[in-house]
Image: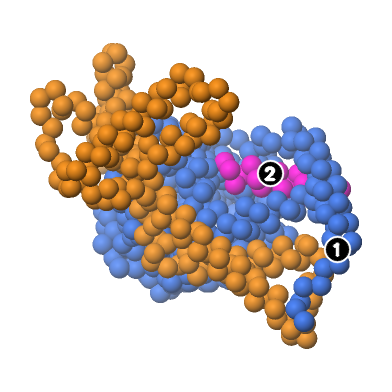
């Protein structure tokens, strides 16, 4: 006897019920669309610096600020940073503000053809360095706290290794460090790609192409099962609004500045230079042994984009003696937006920063 | 497969191609009464492009004289064929994965009810299908064949786009329009100038002179 025990009459009812709920969900999504789309984050903030397409934002405090040293968040280039402030009850930034952290965020903008020649040197030294220098001047401090997210963590590591005097504490979140671990499917795929030729022809690398690669990591879950949840949330406008925001964020992938993309892929995905050494940015050697500030490394146990095995080795590669690894039980997106993360991560980060 | 090195066969193929092309043109001018125009067109197209499954081409003559201009079109056709081959190979792998996923699903459903809970709803069946599909996909996606086929598909698409771009640039240039290559060159100069200015500002900063 097999496990299949579907009663035909019940199946017919299930289909009818699912179709009805799906239709109701789609109707509700249509009504929500205009009010939900278009937000770049939930928390009030002010633009304090512009550099080409980059905008540096400072978030308005929710409580009195506890520390004179600001926290600068360096997000990835491949997605938009409002994931960190998606909605009031799902916001890492809001959680940090509620604990008195003075939060700044870099919005890299959307590169266009004029940015095709931007290199990692521009992102790591000119843009990120410019923001750090701005904060050092504005706050009268020699160094800032830096929080790098995903690819932004890799950029933050590069900066902190090149300019250790400018970074007081470094937090990395779901940040790849060892790109050649067996679970790293993206790295396996891209290792055979002639990225320089690709960039030579395409100029900037389309965000849609990267999105397709991300969906390709788990295509049935991400392109099929996920959408069935519309029917589950048909009568829950808050859940549908969250679904819409998430969908918008997922599809909102900026094109990648060609030269920087090629250098990133070559240096990290293909040549694993953090681990094997030999990385240079702007003519200077990047050696993680030069990174001596305290480091908090947050990674997710079920991350399918940056497997924990890609993040964990950081502690053994840096020169700092003050290293804390923190494994979050969740996935790459859950680390920002899951309910448990809202409580746990801002608290963990704020408490880790406080005595340092 | 056509053996292009065999003159008789090559000639027959060329004549057949000519006949097909002529028939296609006639179809486009107006199908015979009672004929299904779309079926006729489809059939003609399929016969016409059956040559896409060519064996490796014999060494090509270098293009010279007036034939030189057709090189760009030939390269575009070759890139198109490469794309089709790469897509076919990738689809073949996807079909293999789908078959493996179906096998997994059947095996999962065949498990005795005492070992696994029964599947009593379509939703559960869909969930099981997704799980089996992801498992089969993960095995294949981590393999070298998959990475190689995907990289070849990307590379072939990039080259196809390159050849199209080359033709477009020829036309743009002929019409006095700026080309992508020209814009890229200008942007590259601007980027180099910005880097140079930044370096000069750093040097001024080191000398204690505030940058302008």
Badge 1 sits on which subunit? A
Q: Residue A68's x, y, as percent? A: 56, 51
Work out whether residue A192 or residue A300 is closer to the camera in this orientation and state it: A192
Identify residue for label 2: A245
Q: Is residue B81 left or right of residue A136?
A: left
| Shade representing chain A | blue
At horizontal 65% and vertical 71% (from top left) the residue drawn is B105
- The outermost residue toward the front is B33
Looking at the image, tell me whether mark 1 or mark 2 is earlier in sequence order: 1
Q: Residue B81's x, y, as percent? A: 33, 43
Q: Is residue A190 left or right of residue B11?
A: right
Q: Is residue A242 left or right of residue A117?
A: right
Q: What is the crowding at mark 2: few (fewer than 14 residues within 10 Å), some, or many (at least 20)? A: many
Observer able to see residue A196: no
Q: Is residue A35 left or right of residue A317?
A: right
- On the same chain, marks 1 and 2? The answer is yes
Chain letter for orange, please: B
Q: Residue B18's x, y, as percent? A: 30, 30
Identify residue for label 1: A8
Viewer-side label of 1, 2:
1
Q: How is the image coloured?
A: by chain
At horizontal 39% and vertical 57% (from top left) the residue drawn is B149
The magenta stretch spans which residues? A235-252
- The outermost residue toward the bottom is B114
In the displayed structure, B109 sits above or below A60; it is below
In the displayed structure, A198 sits above or below A343; it is above
Q: Residue B201's x, y, as percent? A: 28, 35
């Amino acid at each position: 006897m097999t496990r299949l025990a579907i009663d035909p009459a019940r199946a017919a009812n299930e289909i009818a019920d699912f179709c009805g709920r799906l239709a109701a969900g789609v109707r509700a999504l249509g009504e929500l669309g205009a009010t939900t789309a278009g937000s770049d984050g939930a928390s009030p903030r002010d633009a304090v610096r512009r550099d080409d397409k980059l905008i540096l934002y400072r978030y308005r405090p929710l409580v009195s600020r506890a520390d004179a040293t600001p926290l600068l968040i360096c997000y990835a280039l491949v997605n938009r940073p409002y994931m960190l402030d998606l909605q009031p009850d799902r916001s890492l930034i809001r959680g940090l503000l509620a604990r008195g952290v003075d939060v700044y965020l870099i919005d890299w903008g959307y590169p266009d053809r004029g940015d095709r020649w931007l290199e990692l040197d521009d992102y790591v030294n000119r843009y990120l360095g410019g923001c750090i220098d701005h904060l050092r001047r504005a706050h009268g401090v020699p160094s800032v706290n830096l929080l790098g997210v995903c690819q932004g963590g890799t950029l933050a590591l590069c900066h902190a290794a090149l300019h250790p005097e400018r970074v007081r504490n470094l937090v990395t979140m779901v940040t790849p460090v060892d790109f050649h671990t067996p679970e790293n499917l993206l790295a396996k795929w891209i290792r055979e790609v002639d990225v320089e030729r690709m960039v030579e022809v395409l100029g900037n690398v389309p965000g849609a192409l990267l999105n397709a690669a991300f969906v390709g990591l788990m295509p049935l879950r991400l392109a099929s099962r996920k959408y069935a949840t519309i029917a589950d949330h048909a009568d829950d406008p808050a859940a549908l609004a969250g679904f819409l925001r998430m969908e918008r964020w997922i599809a909102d992938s900026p094109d990648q500045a060609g030269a920087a993309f090629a250098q990133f892929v070559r240096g990290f995905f293909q040549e694993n230079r953090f681990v094997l050494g030999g990385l240079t940015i702007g003519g200077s050697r990047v050696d993680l042994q030069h990174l001596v500030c305290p480091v908090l490394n947050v990674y997710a146990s079920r991350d399918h984009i940056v497997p924990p095995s890609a993040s964990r080795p950081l502690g053994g590669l840096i020169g700092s003696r003050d290293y804390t690894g923190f494994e979050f039980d969740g996935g790459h997106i859950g680390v920002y937006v899951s309910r448990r993360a809202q409580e746990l991560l801002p608290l963990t980060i704020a408490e880790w920063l406080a005595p340092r | 497969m056509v053996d292009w090195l065999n003159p008789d066969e090559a000639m027959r193929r060329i004549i057949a191609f000519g006949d097909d092309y002529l028939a296609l043109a006639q179809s486009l001018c107006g199908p015979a009464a009672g004929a299904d125009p779309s079926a006729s067109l489809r059939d003609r197209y399929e016969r016409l492009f059956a040559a896409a499954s060519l064996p490796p081409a014999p060494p090509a003559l270098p293009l010279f004289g007036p034939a030189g201009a057709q090189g760009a079109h030939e390269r575009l056709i070759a890139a198109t064929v490469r794309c089709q081959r790469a897509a076919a190979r990738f689809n073949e792998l996807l079909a293999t994965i789908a078959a493996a996923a179906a096998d997994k699903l059947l095996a999962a459903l065949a498990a005795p009810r005492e070992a696994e809970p029964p599947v009593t709803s379509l939703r559960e069946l869909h969930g099981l299908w997704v799980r089996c599909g992801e498992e089969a996909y993960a095995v294949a996606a981590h393999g070298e064949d998959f990475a190689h086929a995907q990289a070849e598909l990307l590379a072939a698409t990039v080259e196809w786009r390159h050849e199209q771009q080359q033709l477009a640039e020829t036309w743009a240039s002929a019409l006095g329009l700026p080309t992508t290559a020209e814009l890229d060159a200008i942007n590259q100069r601007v980027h180099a100038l910005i880097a140079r200015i930044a370096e000069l500002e750093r040097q001024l900063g080191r000398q204690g002179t505030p940058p302008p």
